[in-house]
Amino acid sequence: MTTWCRSCLNISFERETVERYPAVSSPIGAESLALGEGNDMTKGGRHARVTPLALVVRALRLAATVGVFAGALIAGTAVAETPAEFIYRVSHSTFGDIGTYSNTIEPSRDGTTVQTRAHFEVSMLGVRMFREDAARTERWLGNRLVSFHGVTDKGNGPVEVNGEARGNGFVITSSSQGTITAPASVHPANPWSNNFLSSNTMMRPDSGKLEQVRIGSGQETTVKIDGATVSAVKFEIDGSTKYTVWLDARGVPVKFVADDDTGKVTFTLAKCIGCGPEPAQIGTR
């Protein structure tokens, strides 16, 4: 990793998602993180040496994962019941800034639509090294996911993941995982509300792969956002990748980090439309 220079990389980030939910509120929760990749990013056997291209790809996949996680943390009754848009700056501990990530929540009497946009692209010396685009649609009834459709394209053609509630389970079909049945409480790796803290089963939206996660108890702390010190509650989520999330007094994830052997990917809230004062306005300098 020491052979890379940040100035050599031009990385931008964008992913697209559409999710549908009924307008409901639940306790602050953070189940799993938006995971764009399956075990490709965190396989148990870690090599002593990683090629630069492989490192770039893995780092971006980690970013995808975190990105989805971001959506997962959008929480709080006020957020769930009013339209809001969350825009994040995204950076990597080795590659520097890699772009932006956003979640838009549009509630209605019949449910809520969550649109997530992201695009991942890495270029080095003018040559594109990696790119990923994705779109997802989720539909929720109460706190239960009743359908899922996702398409992810990493340059080799689109890959679909579909899921639907059946009886006491949730049946997921994908080209990589085949057909599997998850618990009814499963949440995609882009939980949009605080109810994700109530589930320990996460589905990765790019592959349909299931992962068990452990969620630590929240700790009151502060976090720096645009130079302001913001009061927050920190949650740590432990799965194949470790995640840390900071929720402010509004229940908004103002910052979250995914950490694995490729480094840390950090999402910092840059703008929050329709969810009250900006972090810099509710914090102290």
Image: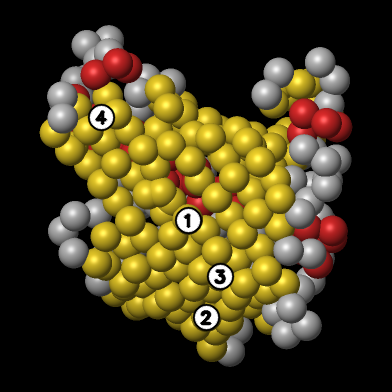
Q: Amino acid at mark 1?
A: Arg
Instruction: Kindly report which numbered mark, 3 or 4, lies closer to the viewer in this rendering.
Output: 3
Q: Are marks 3 and 1 in contact (CB under 8 Å)?
A: no
Disc number for residue 55 = 4
For marks 3 and 4, the one nearer the N-term is: 3
Disc number for residue 117 = 1
144 to the left or right of 276:
left
Q: Calculate the distance from the C-alpha at mark 2 to the C-alpha at mark 4.
A: 34 Å
Estimate the x, y position of residue 118 in percent, counting from the top left. 43, 51
Could you classify mark 4 by the number of other residues whose Cα lies within 10 Å: few (under 14), some (14-19), or many (20 or more)? some
Could you classify mark 1 by the number of other residues whose Cα lies within 10 Å: few (under 14), some (14-19), or many (20 or more)? many
Instruction: Tell me where residue 57 sits by quadrant.
Output: top left
Q: Calculate the distance from the C-alpha at mark 4 to the C-alpha at mark 1.
A: 23 Å
Q: Amino acid at mark 2?
A: Ser
Q: Is residue 236 visible?
A: no
Mark 3 highlights which residue?
A: 19
3 to the left or right of 273:
left
For marks 4 and 1, the one nearer the N-term is: 4
Q: Amino acid at mark 3?
A: Glu
> Residue at (73%, 85%) from the top-left corner?
110
Could you classify mark 2 by the number of other residues whose Cα lies within 10 Å: few (under 14), some (14-19), or many (20 or more)? many
Mark 2 highlights which residue?
A: 147
Q: Are marks 2 and 4 in contact (CB under 8 Å)?
A: no
Estimate the x, y position of residue 248 in percent, counting from the top left. 79, 38
Could you classify mark 3 by the number of other residues whose Cα lies within 10 Å: few (under 14), some (14-19), or many (20 or more)? many
Q: Quadrant of the N terminus?
A: top left
Q: Calculate the distance from the C-alpha at mark 3 to the C-alpha at mark 2.
A: 10 Å
Q: Is residue 285 visible?
A: yes
Q: Secondary structure at mark 1?
A: strand
Vertically, is 259 above or below 42? above
For marks 3 and 1, the one nearer the N-term is: 3
Instruction: Tell me where residue 75 sits by quadrant.
Output: bottom right
